[in-house]
Image (cartoon, grey):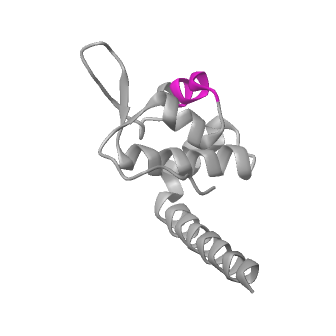
Amino acid sequence: MHVDLPEKRYYGIGEVAKAFGVNTSLIRFWEKEFDVLQPKKNAKGNRKFTPQDIHNLQLIYHLVKERGFTLEGAKTHLKEEKQKTLSTFEVVQKLQKVKAELLKIKEQL
């Protein structure tokens, strides 16, 4: 999944949920379930997600929503095969970007 967010240091939970097309409650749930998600909280307790958190959310989304992993399966997969999963995921993301660019070119013809 390609998430289209402007480059910023921090993202609010609302804009993160909107970018992923999910409810904020799912983002909060995944935060509790996955140790790799560690958003900072301001004085009011509002979550502020870093670009690294967004990257980890993309990986979780990919495993759970696109590949159909259970939460436990995704956790295990992240712990045991994180580097392999990251490499594969990054290749898929790059290919999706290339495809999008090629489709733009095709539309201009």
Is 88 placed left or right of 106 in the picture? left
- Residue 24 coordinates in the image, percent (x, y): 57, 25
Residue 50: name its quadrant: top left
Magenta span of residues:
23-30
Instruction: Please identify the residue farthest to the top as the structure is shown.
Output: 44
- Residue 64 coordinates in the image, percent (x, y): 67, 44
Instruction: Please identify the residue farthest to the bottom as the structure is shown.
Output: 109
Q: In which quarter of the image is the N terminus?
A: bottom right
- Residue 103 coordinates in the image, percent (x, y): 72, 76
Seen at 38% across and 25% down, the residue is 47
Is 99 placed left or right of 32 in the picture? right
Camera-nearest residue between 2 and 33: 2
Instruction: Please identify the residue farthest to the left as the structure is shown.
Output: 43
Is 80 placed left or right of 6 in the picture? right
Seen at 58% across and 67% down, the residue is 93
Seen at 33% across and 15% down, the residue is 45
Look at the picture and state if 102 lies above or below 56: below
- Residue 108 coordinates in the image, percent (x, y): 71, 81
Look at the picture and state if 75 lies above or below 41: below
Camera-nearest residue between 15 and 61: 15
Is 89 placed left or right of 43 in the picture? right
80 within the magenta span: no
Q: Quadrant of the C terminus?
A: bottom right
Camera-nearest residue between 9 and 57: 9
Look at the magenta stretch and give its main secondary structure.
helix
Instruction: Please identify the residue farthest to the front as the structure is shown.
Output: 108
